[in-house]
Image (tube, rainbow, N blue to C red):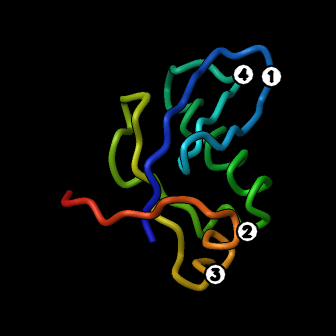
Amino acid sequence: MKLKIKVTPNAKENKVIKKDGFLRIYTTAPAKEGKANQAVIEILSKHLNIAKSRIFIVKGLKSKDKIITVDPRSAQLIHSYNLNTHTYSL
């Protein structure tokens, strides 16, 4: 399962907003040395209540626009949040 997300680093607080079926993730971590990427995985893990080891950034490691893949065993949980899921060519 793949999700398209938008990340805002250096935010005042960590939060997740669902907008138009997609997730916008705000993190207090800076966009340096992968800190924001690590924070995104941690924030998503808590928000979706799934293990960090089941979330991977597959595209956009150096971009605010990212494509996240979630372990298929957690797919039902993603659908329960009514998020748009897409398949993207990598």
In the drawing, does residue 27 fall left or right of residue 37? Answer: right
Up/down of 63 relative to 82, above or below = above
Q: Where is residue 46 in the image (x, y as percent from the top left)?
A: 79, 54
- Name the mark nearer the viewer: 3 or 4: 3
Q: Mark 1 points at which residue?
A: 13
Precedes in sequence: disc 2 or disc 1: 1
Q: Residue 28 carries which label?
A: 4
Task: Give yes or no for contact between labels 1 and 3 (Cβ–Cβ under 8 Å).
Answer: no
Quickly name the residue at label 3. Answer: 76
Q: Circles 3 and 4: CB distance less than 8 Å?
A: no
Quadrant holding the N terminus = bottom left
- First in sequence: mark 1 or mark 3? 1
Image quadrant containing the C terminus: bottom left
Tag 2 residue: 50
What distance separates the C-alpha of mark 2 from that of mark 1?
21 Å
Which badge, 4 or 1, comes first in the chain's sequence? Answer: 1
Q: Which residue is drawn at 40% across and 50% down?
A: 67
